[in-house]
Amino acid sequence: MKKQRLFPVALLVGSLVLSLLAGCGSNAAPSTNSNTPQTAPANASASTNAGSTPAQPAAEEKMKLVHEGKLTFAMSGLLKPLNYKDENNVLTGFDVEIGNEIAKRIGLAANPVTNPWETILQGLKGNKYDAIIGSMTHTEERAKQVDFTEPYYISGGQIFIAESNDTIKSRDDLKGQIIGVVQASTHKEVAETLTDKEKVKGYPTDIYALQDLVPGRVAAVITDRVVGTSAIKNQGLKIKPIDEVLNKENIAIAVTKDNPVLTKKINEAIKSMIDDGTYEQISMKWFGANLLK
């Protein structure tokens, strides 16, 4: 009899437990093994990128040009065969041809112009032209004022004397002698170490200085090796070099410091000219040698 009374109670307790378990299961997360498709919220993508801005391509930096669509570059126009005016008054020479090729590779029209050498840096900084492609030596002092590209040729100061001069054999023989140099050139400083300061004579161009050697108005001239060599070959001047090159000089293109994009593009153009052989062709045409070697 006792057993029969306890059975209904046990059954009632078991029913209550099952009910409680069923109630808890209604709030549980769906099983990962459920076959019910799970649909992502419609705005899921938007919420993932919330607060972030899609990356935009950087705007291409632009060159600063004096004349739109043109590369305007300056030189003295008095440094044959590097830069000078031909019989038709057209600028020509090694520097001009290098500048023309650089402009073409940058995608600009070439616009060579002249400016007196003494004020050529001031003209660049005053935005009269975009660059100086006029056989300018890269020096620390000049680099304080402008930026320089990689060199487009290598030269150095060379002493030249009259072909008939047998008394001057080396730089050691120049003490007390009159030495001719181009005004405002780096050769002036060198000349002052080889002779008395008052014995250094300035000229507007190298050619005028070299022409004064034969009549004896100067005992020696210090100029770029390529200039003196060209004067012998192309103009028939009766002069000769003595001693070794005084100092190696990197001849580069000057650009204003606020125009780094142009400097970069010029460097890229020079490199491509060297790589494809165009540079050597131009150099051989004017000097019979590769001026970067």
Image (cartoon, rainbow, N blue to C red):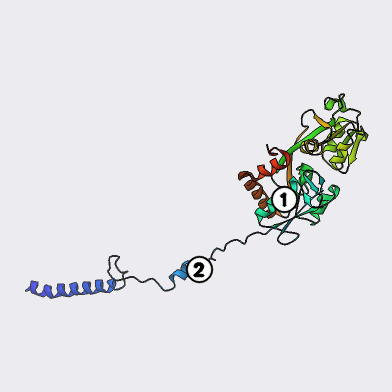
Label 1 CA crowd tier, 10 Å (few <14, some 14–19, many 20+): many
User: Image quarter for residue 40?
Assistant: bottom left
Location of residue 94 with respect to 161 vertically, above or below? below
The residue beneath circle 1 is 99
Location of residue 79 with respect to 32 vertically, above or below? above
Q: Of 19 and 262, which appears nearest the observer?
A: 262
**What is the secondary structure assignment of the residue under circle 2?**
loop
Label 2 CA crowd tier, 10 Å (few <14, some 14–19, many 20+): few
Q: Position of residue 274 (x, y in %)?
A: 64, 44
Alpha carbons under labels 1 and 2: distance apart = 52 Å
Residue beneath the point at 15% across and 74% down: 11
Q: Amino acid at mark 2?
A: Ala
Q: Of 145 and 189, which appears nearest the observer?
A: 189
Q: Is residue 257 left or right of residue 182?
A: left
Q: Earlier in the sequence, mark 1 or mark 2?
A: 2
Q: Position of residue 2 (x, y in %)?
A: 8, 72
Q: Is there any visible trace of residue 151 in the rendered image?
A: no
Residue beneath the point at 83% across and 32% down: 239
The residue beneath circle 2 is 50
Query: Looking at the image, is mark 1 or mark 2 nearer the viewer?
Result: 1
Q: Is residue 6 left or right of residue 264?
A: left
Residue beneath the point at 91% across and 29% down: 177
